[in-house]
Amino acid sequence: MQKITLIPGDGIGPEITNSVTEILKAAGAEIEWEVQTAGADVAEVEGSPLPDRVIESIKKNKVALKAPVTTPIGKGFRSVNVALRKSLDLYSNLRPCKNIDGIKTRFDNVDLVIVRENTEDLYAGIERQIDADTAESIKIITRKASTRIVEFAFDYAIKNNRKLVTAVSKANICKLSDGLFLECAREVSKKYPQIEYKEILVDNLCMQLVQKPEQFDVLVLPNLYGDIVSDLCAGLIGGLGVAQGANIGLDAAVFEPVHGSAPDIKGQNKANPTALLLSAIEMLKYIEQRKVAEKVEKALYKTLKEQKVVTADLGGTATTTEFTKEVISNL
Ligand code: NAI
């Protein structure tokens, strides 16, 4: 049995977490969950939305599965997600985007991987109100973080038989900050002659992605562009309900979907657990429970391909519970 930290989050988090833990149990995963709550409700009771016990649990277990946690907009605490990534130095955010059989989308040839820098850029949280009518956010880009994220992208490309790494920036405008990111990317690319290296500006990338997504393979981006472009890419493969992710550092890894807590459908038994389930499948592979991972993957893909029992975001009428039962029966 491997101990893994489980953060059920809030909003639709607990519903999709129940679904995923039920499926993994039925598939025979050898996991003992250590449940750790976080978020607004926890802040009311414990004074912080991310108490130290959560970080300690992940440090000890080294692996976590996390459902989304709400971040108040414009006021209140800083994002639990950003804080978690920073305090565990989970510097790479990996978001594979590949078409899934049965899910109808505009393109059927999307197979790319987003590698998003996870610790700095505008997410460093350095903001101030200069006067009543002026606010300032500071964008931090460092050589250390840029170099290691690009190295991560190239190493990932090699391990996963990918051919091309494209560095994304807005270095024509942010000449110093994005300029430094690109300088590091060029430097790192020289160490990997077997992988093709290209550069693109983020605005052009967005247009190309919605016209010819098949030309991209591994994309490496600073934090903010990575955040935005990964939602765009989620849209290319069927929406947020099916977009998985992982935050990986040297000492710990947290697997979580791209989507948020979806307060608009909270508690309605409507949420699609696929993105969290795909994240859990990657987690199973990461902890070397590959057989179980493949079993769950097959059952999930069969369910999605048949399109008989799918949730509303994929055009179906199934509830979260019905979808969960269908995946289990396909195991
Ligand atoms: P969201 O991803 O929660 O929702 C956007 C839209 O997609 C909504 O219409 C929602 O119903 C739908 N959707 C998302 N996941 C779905 C699923 N699994 N099944 C079916 N439909 C789904 O984005 P939003 O509304 O911008 O953010 C809500 C909250 O989540 C915010 O407080 C935000 O800060 C937080 N958030 C947390 C993340 C995390 O914990 N990693 C990531 C992104 C946002």
Image: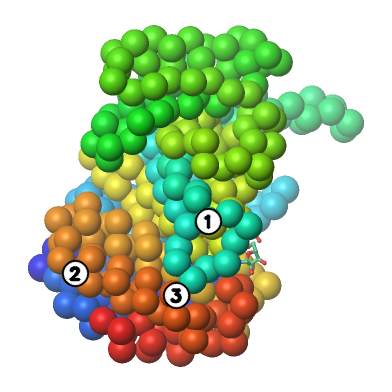
Residue 226 is left or right of residue 164, and the answer is right
- Marks 1,2: beta carbons within 8 A: no
Q: For the residue labelled by badge 1, is the local secondary structure a helix, a strand or a loop? A: loop
Nearer to us: label 1 or label 2: 1
Identified by mark 2, the residue type is Val
Image-quarter location of ligand 1: bottom right
Nearer to us: label 1 or label 3: 1
Distance (Cα) linking label 2 and label 3: 18 Å
Indicate which disc, 2 or 3, sits on the residue closer to the N terminus: 2
**Quadrant (top left/top right/bottom left/bottom right) for the N terminus:** bottom left
Q: Position of residue 206 (x, y in %)?
A: 66, 37
**Quadrant (top left/top right/bottom left/bottom right) for the C terminus:** bottom left
Q: Which residue is mark 2?
A: 292
Q: For the residue labelled by badge 3, is the local secondary structure a helix, a strand or a loop? A: helix
Residue 83 is left or right of residue 11, and the answer is left
Q: Which residue is mark 1?
A: 108
